[in-house]
Amino acid sequence: DTEVTQTPKHLVMGMTNKKSLKCEQHMGHRAMYWYKQKAKKPPELMFVYSYEKLSINESVPSRFSPECPNSSLLNLHLHALQPEDSALYLCASNQNLAGPYNEQFFGPGTRLTVL
Amino acid sequence: AQSVTQPDIHITVSEGASLELRCNYSYGATPYLFWYVQSPGQGLQLLLKYFSGDTLVQGIKGFEAEFKRSQSSFNLRKPSVHWSDAAEYFCAVGAAETNAGKSTFGDGTTLTVKP
């Protein structure tokens, strides 16, 4: 299985809602990532987990809260988002952080719309 | 700090014509270079990667790229473009050892294929 799956595919939420994005991989990868991508722009790194521990937080607002319950699963909890947070949220995984040559495997993304 | 420049924001080619997408990088040590493709509304898919060795790298879908250290370039090529190649293409530099987990993406090149 060389796939990263993400659910849901689309999400529409109001600014007062609480929702979660889910990402799963079964490749035995020990590094997992959340990216935010606006239209016609490259992915912007948000968080990196390495061996289930938060390794990098790119100064992301606290309304985004990541969680890595186990080595296969990565969640992104959303609360009190703003319309400008509307974007494609991509999850990726990588064998581990020790090898910069390891390519990232990306999921299909969750298209988030904040009303 | 590492950086990636993709000089062409948008390229249009006719189906069956050859393609070259440019990528220039800035990196102090041995670069780890990647090309990803993203179809609309989808995640990123790795086309090919370079770490060392033969400077001409073969990838999936008939793509190849040539690493030229003297020019700090890693251009992507395809001899004959198919309509299904229309997509966004991102060049990326792998994370430096001191910046583990963070890859740097170029701004992307949008490829349009004319029938």
Image (tube, grey):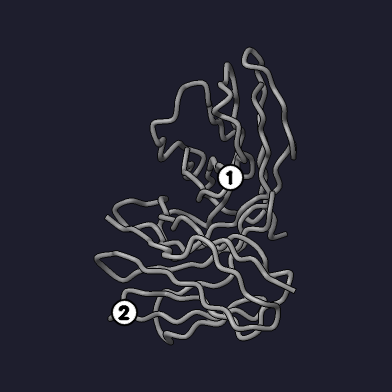
Residue beneath disc 2: B69
- Pinpoint the chain carrying mark 2: B
Instruction: Please determine whether, in this image, residue B39 is positioned above or below residue B41.
Output: below
Point out the residue furthest to the top here: A16
Numbered disc in front, either 1 or 2: 1
Q: How far is the residue under mark 1 from the one under mark 2?
A: 32 Å
User: Which image quarter holds the C terminus of chain A?
Assistant: top right
> Percent position (x, y) of residue B43?
64, 52
Kind of element beneath mark 1 = loop
Q: Nearer the viewer, residue A77 or A112?
A: A112
Q: Quadrant of residue A23?
A: top right
Give percent across and percent down for residue B39.
67, 58
Give the residue displayed 60% in from the left and 63% down from the top.
Answer: B37
Please say if the residues under marks 1 and 2 sit with CB atoms less than 8 Å apart: no
Q: Amino acid at mark 2?
A: Arg
Q: x and y percent of residue B97 in the render?
A: 32, 57
- In the rendered structure, which amino acid carries the disc numbered 1? Ala
User: Who's the residue at 46% across and 65% down the image?
Assistant: B8
**On screen, A20 above or below B50?**
above
1 and 2 marks on the same chain: no
Horizontally, is B71 left or right of A21 in the view? Answer: left
* Residue designated by label 1: A39
* Location of residue B22 with respect to B2 vertically, above or below: below
Judge by depth and name the residue closer to the eye, B113 or B106: B113
- What SS does tag 2 mark? helix
Residue at left offset 44%, top offset 30%: A60
The subunit letter for the residue under badge 1 reads A
The 10 Å Cα crowd at callout 1, few under 14, some 14 to 19, many 20 or more, is: few
- Say few, some or many: other residues with alpha carbon within 10 Å of mark 2 (under 14 / 14 to 19 / 20 or more): few
